[in-house]
């Protein structure tokens, strides 16, 4: 199919759903960076350890799971169709693929490679005697949260750009 031909309803649905889910995740990460991370920076070692455990446990819930995994699965399906149908040569296809790439690397890879291991480590800390480097861990966790937040926002903007380019 020629990349100059507008894609069908399925692709438009996948683009729009990717933007919605990407926006939800960008909002989640932004709200966390702009409030929770700032509050965590004021806590002592024992309070930080005590607070991080339930945060990391409570985020594992069905509503978050749908948004988190949906923001991966839907864009990946959309990207596969963009690539297979040759839409990658169009501006909307390039914007969408850039959004998927930024999200997968800047948000998901950071979460899996940085935050998951750090969260697992924090879960083993003793409230009575957190590790000596706890403040450095907190700072690293916060920094990488800001990175994934920025990536999620950029990805969302790219999805919106793809939709605008399509005239949706």
Image (cartoon, rainbow, N blue to C red):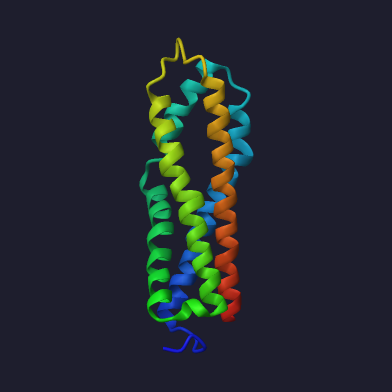
The residue drawn where x is 38% and y is 71% is: 80
The residue drawn where x is 55% and y is 59% is: 155
Residue furthest to the front in view is 89
Q: Position of residue 81 (x, y in %)?
A: 39, 75
Quarter of the image where one finds residue 117? top left
Q: How many marks?
A: 0
On screen, residue 67 above or below 50: below
User: In the rendered view, does 32 fall on the left or right side of 17?
Assistant: right
Q: Position of residue 85 (x, y in %)?
A: 40, 81
Quarter occupied by the N terminus: bottom left
Residue 55 appearing in the image: yes
Front position in the image: 126 or 135: 135
Front position in the image: 61 or 140: 140
The residue drawn where x is 38% and y is 30% is: 120
The residue drawn where x is 43% and y is 65% is: 75
Quarter of the image where one finds residue 43? top right
User: In the rendered view, does 143 fall on the left or right side of 100?
Assistant: right
Quarter occupied by the C terminus: bottom right
Quarter of the image where one finds residue 56? top left
Residue furthest to the top in view is 128
Q: Position of residue 122 (x, y in %)?
A: 43, 25
On screen, residue 17 above or below 32: below
On screen, residue 43 above or below 86: above
């Amino acid at each position: 199919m020629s990349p100059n031909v507008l894609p069908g309803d399925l692709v438009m649905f996948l683009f729009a759903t990717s933007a919605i889910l990407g926006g939800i995740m960008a909002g989640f990460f932004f709200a966390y960076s702009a409030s929770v991370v700032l509050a965590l920076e004021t806590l002592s070692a024992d309070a930080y350890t005590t607070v991080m455990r339930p945060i990391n446990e409570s985020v594992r819930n069905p509503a978050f799971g749908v948004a988190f995994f949906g923001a991966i699965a839907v864009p990946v399906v959309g990207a596969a169709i963009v690539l297979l149908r040759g839409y990658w040569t169009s501006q909307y296809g390039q914007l969408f693929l850039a959004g998927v790439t930024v999200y997968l690397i800047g948000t998901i890879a950071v979460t899996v490679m940085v935050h998951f291991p750090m969260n697992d480590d924090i879960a083993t800390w003793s409230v009575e005697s957190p590790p000596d480097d706890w403040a450095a861990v907190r700072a690293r966790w916060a920094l990488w949260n800001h990175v994934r937040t920025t990536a999620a926002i950029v990805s969302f903007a790219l999805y919106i750009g793809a939709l605008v380019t399509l005239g949706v």
